[in-house]
Amino acid sequence: MGSGQAVAVFGAYGHTGRFVVAELAERGFVPVLSGRGAGRLDALASATGHEARPASVDDPASLDRALAGTAAVVNCAGPFAATTAPVAGAALRAGVPYVDVAAEIEANADTFAHFADRARAAGTVVLPAMAFFGGLGDLLATAAMGDWTKADEAHIAYGLSSWHPTGGTRQSGTVSGERRDGRRVRFTSGRLEYHTDAPTTLEWTFPEPLGTRTLVGEFTMADVITLPSHLEIPEVRTSMAAGAARDLADARTPAPEAVDERGRSAQTFVVDVVVRSGGEERRAVASGQDIYAVTAPLVGEAVDRVLTGRTRTVGVASAGALFDARGFLRALAPHLTVDLRR
């Protein structure tokens, strides 16, 4: 476990950040609370007893102070188009691993493009999208691949019971939409393509008890960056439960509300991953509660493995490239139900 190592959490007072802070503390790490809102940091520090170190992405010296003496930093503050480069840069200056929970496709692509050489030269880890979107799908797809070295297609189907987005999710979505000029994105023939055609729907049969559901096809998420970064799969598709997609699109949908002592919402999910090669397919399925809350154990397990040397590479790497995917997923058993099928 954490053995008292300090881990900075930038955006600690946000919805996902609070889950991450609690998870790190439960694992024996000492969270160092950081972010742009000094008042919100002080309130969280008072409630948790953890040290607060205000910092701004516009002030590199403040980020350096926030990371001083820490073993790693987790960036939970979106939009990640604005925060990733400054916080990852501070991590490289401090010589500590960087982890973020970015779901923004463009921000994750930027991380691979701009930090690969610097992180490799420094011999440290930069881990983007270590979250429900991007990280979990990558781990499931990697586990499903097994001994395959390549596949023709990967399809990740998100069966969310509902989606009450946080303010951060809405803000990040707006930034991503602006960066792509309102176009939609797909990963096909081994590259990202932008287009303006209307979204399609499809019927997807999830394992019971969810059964057959209508999905919005090409509801593209960060998995189109994480999977192709290390898996030879030229077609990567992600689809979303139609009801959850409508929730996200509706400005009147409220933010998530806690229904249990851990602060989780009532939202449930099934992530169904199918990889295909020729006429054969392999499948991996994960189910659980609250996409924001489950990001915290994903982050906690990642930080623990990075700081104990249980990694496969250095530089910028996705979860599936960095860790033993099957072992990682087994370690999440208290938080996820995982079924790896051949």
Image (cartoon, helix red, strand yellow):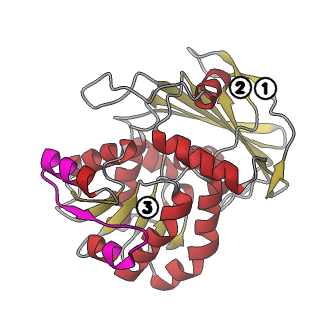
Q: Which residues are magenta?
A: 42-63
Q: Label 2 amino acid?
A: Leu
The structure residue drawn at horizontal position 55% and vertical position 65%, both measured from the top left corner, is 317
Q: Is residue 292 left or right of residue 154?
A: left
Real-space Cα separation, disc 2 to disc 1, in angstroms? 5 Å
Residues at marks 3 and 1 touching, judged by CB atoms closer than 8 Å: no
Return the residue at label 2: 215
Describe the element under mark 1 as helix, strand or loop: strand
* 87 falls in the magenta region: no
Q: Which residue is mark 3?
A: 99
- Left or right: residue 233 compared with residue 260: right
Question: Earlier along the polypeptide chain: callout 3 or callout 1?
Answer: 3
> Local crowd at mark 3 within 10 Å, few (<14), some, or many (≥20)?
many
> Which residue is nearer to you in this view: 27 or 326?
27
Label 2, label 3: how far apart the Cα atoms are: 30 Å
Work out whether 175 lies above or below 97. Answer: above
**Residue at x 44% of width, y 65% of height:** 311
Taking 67 as reference, is 37 above or below it?
above
Rendered location of residue 162, percent (x, y) = 54, 23
Q: Is residue 81 above or below residue 213?
A: below
Q: Which residue is mark 1?
A: 201
Mark yes or no: residue 318 visible: no
